[in-house]
Image (cartoon, helix red, strand yellow):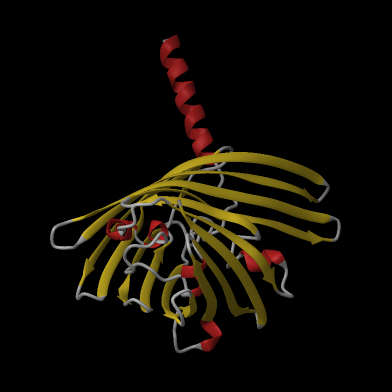
Amino acid sequence: MIRKSLVSVCILLLVSNIAIAKKPPTMSNSYNGMGLSARSFAMAQTGVAMPANIEGIFYNPAALAYIQEERIQAEALFVVSRKSDLLEENINAVDPIGIGFQSFAVVQKQGAVSWRTLSSNETDVSDGSDWYKKQENIKAITISVGNQSENGTAMGLNISYLYGTLAESSYISGTPFAQTSSGNGVSIDIGFMTPLTKQISFGVNLENIVGFMWWENYDFDQLPFGVRTGFGYTSRSFSLLLDFDKKFYRFDDLEENLIGVGLEQYLTRALCIRLGAQGSSLFDKDKLKYTYGVGLDVSMFSLSVSGESYKLDDESILKYLVSLKVLI
């Protein structure tokens, strides 16, 4: 009888904890992240059908299967500036990654290991004597592999370990509150790529087929499932990419459909320019993000600089990135 009573109490406590667990104060895009290079950023964050590139870790791991370089490639990405007259919390709603060192990747042929930021931002809201502050930092460590079949079709896999912290503090109606929570999670992506011709490829990446983040003091987050597909044309001096990106937010009514077009043109053997446009429609300039950049290849080093320009609430936002790739 006593044993049954103890079991009943434990079940009641468990059910109560689940019932009162509240949704974590993350945003819908807190787990989206961005590419690992200023190169892809300058090309409207496209690359699902671009073979043999380090950015494939993010856009399509199947791209790793086509890398022929025997030497180790290492690349680091920095966000150096983000300018606007808007409040930071308004910008964070559409771009949760702030300024600083944001990613590092190491690739050798068909395998890669990377560390990257998914979100890093602060929110500070006040109304008279009442105020609320939040700090959000979420990172991912990813192991990526790609394998190519005899007919040229490739498959790739990303397995990511997620970790982060959420810190909240407030003073509302005379009641103070402060809490810091840590979180851990996992996500899996599967990508496919196939050559249609010698220079044209087609790619598909299924993002967050499995994707969960478990937070201390909160309910868990389920990461948005994403489907990215597109085409790529590449030659020795010119590349043209077209990506379609669809996100399915499991616990929100939000829907996101993005189209991106990016190009790269080498002017000399060492210098190239990059341009791109991304948005829910390529024919509505008010919904587009314009991207641009330059690349410089010297010996074992590749330097990429990129910028992004778009409008939010009729205010301009400018963002600048730089990345450096080294062959070892």
Q: Residue at x 16, y 56 (%)?
A: 149
As drawn, the residue found furthest toward the left would be: 151
Please provide percent x and percent y for residue 308.
Answer: 58, 75
Left or right: 220 in relation to 157:
right
Q: Residue furthest front?
A: 299
Give the percent coordinates (x, y) of residue 148. 21, 56
Q: Position of residue 16 (x, y in %)?
A: 52, 34
Residue occupying the point 31% across, 58% down: 67
From the viewer's side, name the closer residue of 292 and 312: 292
Q: Is residue 81 above or below residue 294?
A: above
Q: Position of residue 198 (x, y in %)?
A: 21, 74
Furthest residue toward right: 129
Residue 270's place in the image compared with 78, above or below, is below
**Quarter the N terminus occupies:** top left
Q: Which residue: 46% across, 75% down?
A: 43
Residue drawn at (45%, 16%), measured in percent from left and top? 5
- Answer whether residue 310 is visible to the viewer in this image: yes
185 relative to 61, above or below: above
